[in-house]
Amino acid sequence: MGPNTTKTCSRVTLSRGLYLCSHKNRNFKVNISKTEQRVLHVLAQGGAIHFERASNGKIREIICFTRDGHVLSDCSGEVFKRLHRRRLIRSQSGKPYRITREGIVAVRPQLDNR
């Protein structure tokens, strides 16, 4: 396992945009980009990622809504895949994707979170 390996995490600790992840007694850091931080911040404030599935079951269209109902253009398919693969977002029972506990810990605090 290299230093940038992404696996499921059992413990997450925030440290300036990086979070330390413990997996099978190995610690590794995962870098979170600005766009990922932006999307996680919107989701932490109550936003959601709505999706539309194709006939084969794969996700075809992704739209990120803020809690006010505005659309966030930064949420592309690639950003969505990275957040989902790192288990920072999750969908339950076909509902829109929301932020997980690991995602809340990984997102950097912003000034408007008061």
Image: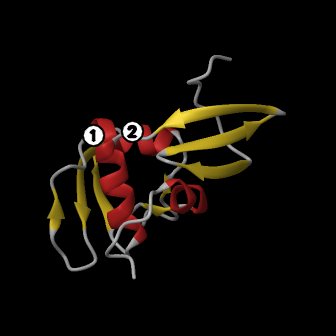
> How dense is the environment of label 2, judged by Cα within 10 Å: few (below 14), some, or many (20 and up)?
few
Q: Residue at x 59, y 56 (%)?
A: 102
Task: Indicate the quadrant where residue 20 lies.
Answer: top right
Would you say residue 57 is visible in this rendering? no
* Residue 42 x/y as whole percent: 32, 65
In front here: 15 or 49?
Answer: 15
Image side of residue 108 versus residue 87, left or right: left
In front here: 37 or 50?
Answer: 37
Question: Please, which colouring scheme is shown?
Answer: secondary structure
Q: Which residue is mark 1?
A: 77
Q: Residue at x 31, y 44 (%)?
A: 34
- Tell me whether the residue at label 1 lies in contact with that at label 2, contact meaning CB atoms closer than 8 angstroms: yes
* Amino acid type of the residue tagged 1 in the rendering: Gly
* Residue 12 x/y as whole percent: 66, 50
Quarter of the rendering occupied by the N terminus: top right
In front here: 18 or 76?
Answer: 18
Q: Which residue is mark 2?
A: 81
